[in-house]
């Protein structure tokens, strides 16, 4: 079994003080760093994603520009490429990250599988090239980008495990529902 760790969107805008803060986001950043220090070498590949939106336009309706955001399909402006909000949280130690993918350029992208590297390689291509068969998923936010990324990983017929100690969600109800949905889809939730 070739294992990858997928770290989803541990960025300033998704943590306390950010434009779209998830409660517990900064703690998740710290815990992921501690986990990587202890278990990083158990993974053949560590991939990290970032939401990376355009500074002009509403990114395909993703940003609420004319009305208040509904926090379901429209959101406050967040993770604009090149801004501090789009940077990784300072407590997330990225030294052992092998591959960085960017998503959401001009459109909503909840799943890291919609992301590409700087040279345009998709996450699925990277995992396939490394013959990855199992993916552990951690990061932010449980009920949106972690959910979408883990679902896509299951759809890619990977063995998927969500590490619940290393995720945080926008809302408790939708986060619990997301984990239920992932269990039902065949992912492990531990
Ligand atoms: Zn976004």
Image: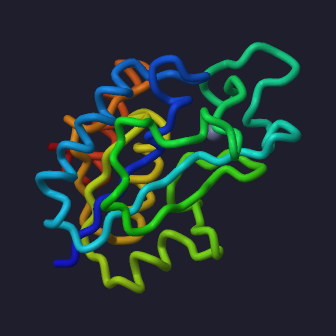
Report whether 125 appears left or right of 155: right
Does 143 sit above or below residue 161?
above
Image region (quadrant) for ligand 1? top right
The structure residue drawn at horizontal position 34% and vertical position 29%, both measured from the top left corner, is 168
Nearer-the-camera pick, 48 or 129: 48
The structure residue drawn at horizontal position 47% and vertical position 44%, both measured from the top left corner, is 9
Q: Which quarter of the figure has residue 172?
A: top left
Report whether 37 appears left or right of 78: left
Nearer-the-camera pick, 28 or 95: 95
Does 73 sit above or below residue 109?
above
Q: Which quarter of the figure has residue 174?
A: top left
Does 114 sit above or below residue 107?
below
Q: Quadrant of the N terminus?
A: bottom left
Report whether 176 appears left or right of 174: left
| Residue 88 locus on image (x, y percent) | 48, 42
Asked whether residue 154 is in view, the answer is no
The structure residue drawn at horizontal position 57% and vertical position 68%, both measured from the top left corner, is 117
Report whether 143 appears left or right of 71: left
């Amino acid at each position: 079994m070739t294992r990858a760790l997928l770290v989803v969107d541990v960025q300033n805008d998704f943590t306390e003080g950010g434009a779209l803060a998830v409660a517990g986001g900064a703690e998740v950043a710290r815990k992921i760093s501690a986990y990587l220090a202890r278990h990083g070498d158990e993974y053949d590949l560590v991939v990290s994603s970032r939401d990376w939106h355009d500074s002009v336009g509403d990114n395909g309706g993703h940003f609420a520009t004319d009305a208040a955001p509904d926090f379901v399909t429209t959101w406050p402006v967040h993770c604009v490429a090149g801004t501090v909000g789009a940077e990784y949280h300072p407590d997330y130690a990225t030294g052992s990250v092998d591959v960085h993918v960017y998503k959401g350029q001009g459109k909503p992208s909840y799943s890291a599988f919609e992301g590409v590297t700087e040279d345009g390689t998709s996450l699925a291509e990277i995992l396939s090239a490394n013959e990855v068969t199992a993916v552990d998923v951690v990061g932010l936010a449980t009920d949106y980008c972690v959910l979408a990324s883990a679902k896509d990983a299951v759809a890619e017929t990977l063995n998927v495990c969500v590490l619940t100690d290393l995720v945080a969600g926008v809302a408790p109800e939708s986060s619990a529902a997301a984990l239920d949905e992932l269990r039902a889809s065949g992912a492990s939730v531990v």
